[in-house]
Image (cartoon, rainbow, N blue to C red):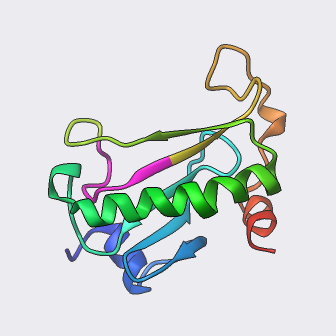
Amino acid sequence: MEDCIFCKIVKGEAPSKTIYEDDMIQIIMNIHPSTNGHLLVIPKEHVVTIMDTSNEVIIHALDIVREKIYPLLKERLHCKGLTLSQNNDLGQEVKHYHLHLTPRYEKDGLNIEYDSKKMLDLDEVYEILTK
């Protein structure tokens, strides 16, 4: 799709901070993170919702998250948990299926208590995850 930012990222036409990539998916840093290490899993094929996404891609993406990405986030960022979420149609800002991986920390701001001083610069988190 021509104006899809995720398709442009997959084609190398738009910048991203890629944490993982293979022939089916690309995992990138979210430029508006909710917590340190907030990532997006995007299929390389343009699909809009979960209903358009093949079981093969969904299963592959979850396998990569379980086997590689969640352990990486726990080891390097010391997160205490991981929230997986995604929107379909209403609430979907980018009309390209994507899965949010939001590392969870105590008092991470996704609950009532929040300390904004704990948020690192996006480049710092990228360096931690890719070194």
Q: Examine the rendered structure and indicate whether residue 16 appears above or below residue 111.
A: below
Asked where in the image residue 78 lies, by quadrant, the reply is top right
Quadrant of the image for the C terminus? Answer: bottom right
- In the displayed structure, 13 sits above or below 76; it is below
Residue found 82% across the figure and 37% down from its top: 118
For residue 81, side relative to residue 107 (left or right): left
Which residue is at a point 56% across and 54% down the rendered structure image? 66
Q: Count the labels in the image.
A: 0
Q: Residue furthest left?
A: 52
Find residue 129 and report its image quarter. Answer: bottom right
Camera-side residue: 83 or 64?
64
For the question of whether residue 63 can be seen, the reply is yes
Q: Is residue 25 left or right of residue 16?
A: left
From the viewer's side, name the closer residue of 8 and 77: 77
How would you classify the magenta stretch by its main secondary structure? Answer: loop
Q: Is residue 129 magenta?
A: no
Residue bounds of the magenta highlight: 92-100
Residue that appears at 72% across and 65% down? 126
Residue 96 placed where, x, y %?
Answer: 27, 59
Residue 94 among those drawn in magenta: yes
Residue 30 in view in this figure? no
Q: Is residue 49 above or below residue 83?
A: below
